[in-house]
Image (cartoon, rainbow, N blue to C red):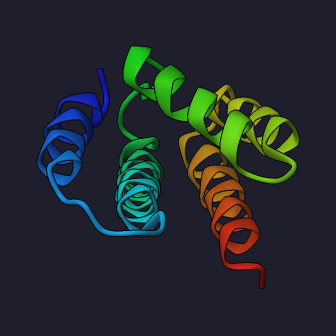
Amino acid sequence: MFAICSFMDMKRKLGNVSFGGNWSEDILTSNQLNSVLGFLDMVAARCADEDMRNDKLEDTLAYVSAHIEKGDMLVAALRKALAMSSPWQRQEAVLRAVRLIKSSVSGV
């Protein structure tokens, strides 16, 4: 399961800190988002040579759907791109979809 172990370890460590505010939750969310985006970069880099559709990708896409504005639409575009038969067209479409996800997160 993607990034859950490190997420839980971090949560345990930060749970012992008693400061006001929600900064520890922000750190966890930021780390998880960075992990998701890094994984999507890897998917884009390898999708021309490998079928990247697997359980880890499904976990990642579920995160995108739940936590990113217009996530369902972005996930649909990425799934459509990954299903393309031509390796180079597939990679180009996946790179485009990942860029859209990243720009949605950064607000650009």
Q: Quadrant of residue 30?
A: bottom left
Q: Position of residue 36 (x, y in %)?
A: 44, 49
8 vs 96, left or right, is left
15 vs 57, left or right, is left
Q: Quadrant of residue 97?
A: bottom right
Quadrant assignment for the C terminus? bottom right
Residue at screen point 74% across, 64% down: 100
Q: Position of residue 79 (x, y in %)?
A: 70, 30
> Looking at this rendering, what residue extends furthest in the top direction?
55
> Looking at this rendering, what residue extends furthest in the bottom direction?
108
Q: What is the tally of numbered marks visible in this picture?
A: 0
Residue at screen point 38% across, 24% down: 56
Q: Quadrant of residue 63?
A: top right
Residue at screen point 28% across, 30% down: 4
105 vs 108, left or right, is left
Question: In this rendering, is residue 19 above or below 64?
Answer: below
Foreground pick, 15 / 55: 15
Q: Position of residue 68 (x, y in %)?
A: 72, 51
Question: In this rendering, is residue 47 above or below 41?
Answer: above
Q: Position of residue 24 (x, y in %)?
A: 35, 61
Foreground pick, 75 / 44: 75
Foreground pick, 34 / 24: 24
Quadrant assignment for the N terminus? top left
Question: In this rendering, is residue 89 above or below 84?
Answer: below
6 vs 97, left or right, is left
